[in-house]
Amino acid sequence: MADTTFAEDMIDPAIAAERRRRNIIFAARIIVAASAILLWELMSPHFDRLVISSPVEIAARSWEWAKDGTLYLNLLVTGEEILLGYVAGAIAAVALGLLLGSYPTIAAILDPLLMAIYGVPKIAFGPLFIVWFGINLTPKVVICGVTVFFFIFLATYEGVRNVDRDLLRTIRLMGATRMQERALVVIPGAMPAILLGLKLAIPEALVGAIVGELIVSNKGIGYLIEYSASQLDSAGVFAGLFILMILAVVANSAVNYATKKTGREMQ
């Protein structure tokens, strides 16, 4: 592996320069994060423990949860809600975005309804979904899916509308069917916008799942945060927040990887 890397660097100096830049950025991120945590720990004796906990206490609470299985159980619940809601919302959003982007008349008819729903804070749907679906996993997944849906739908819709019309006309003159137009021009042309929507929707997936857990739940990271707050346990609240940050980073990295891989396959 090292020999391959060295050979690449010798052949193309740009590869070596880009690799050095990535290494510098990674090291700088570690230094900045470590410095911020160290400063926080040094300043923590001056903070009210009911308001702001210290990094050491937060780490201790996280370790306590990890040892007794609390972290695994609740992380699994929240992860399942996020995954199911994100996938369901993304599939529905891309499908509807491709459809309405291809048929402007239908889009014009449905636009006021979609914008009206989009304008309503998604937390307002929570009590309604609980009435419809109960207090199990389903309402949290639905809230997550609805929250994700509009980001991906709007990105897909705009991506389809901005596809090169000259290219569409050319392929039609060549006798392409509607299905071939979608497969050869529309979907590849809209893919950058779709991938951007998928990336932007990641934080919203977490928001949707946590909002659902805060409304009604006895499991999940949102429940841990709410329970810790009710016990005036700031270390537990911060531990839950940092776990959510890690979830967001992991999910974002996964989408970035998929984006790069898709981009390479399309080239």
Image (spheres, rainbow, N blue to C red):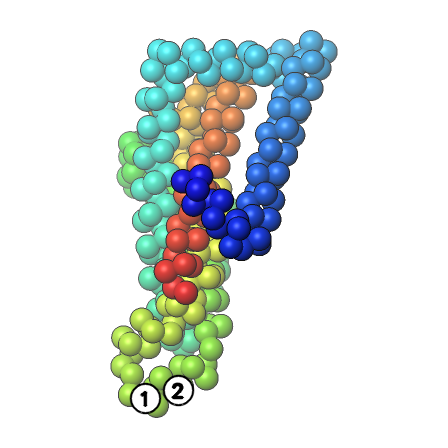
Q: Position of residue 96 (x, y in %)?
A: 35, 63
Q: Nearer the viewer, residue 181 or 118?
A: 181
Q: Secondary structure at mark 1?
A: loop
Residue annotated with mark 2: 170
Which residue is at 45% across, 81% downward? 165
Q: Position of residue 2 (x, y in %)?
A: 44, 39
Q: Nearer the viewer, residue 121 or 180?
A: 180
Which residue is at 42% across, 59% downward? 263
Residue annotated with mark 1: 174
Q: Are marks 2 and 1 in contact (CB under 8 Å)?
A: yes
Quarter occupied by the N terminus: top left
Residue 104 occupies quadrant? bottom left
State the separation of the CA atoms marked 2 and 1.
6 Å
Q: Is residue 204 above or below residue 165?
A: above
Q: Position of residue 216 (x, y in %)?
A: 38, 29
Which residue is at 44% across, 56% downward? 195
Quarter occupied by the C terminus: bottom left
Q: Nearer the viewer, residue 155 or 142?
A: 155
Please state which amino acid type lies under the numbered disc 2.
Answer: Thr
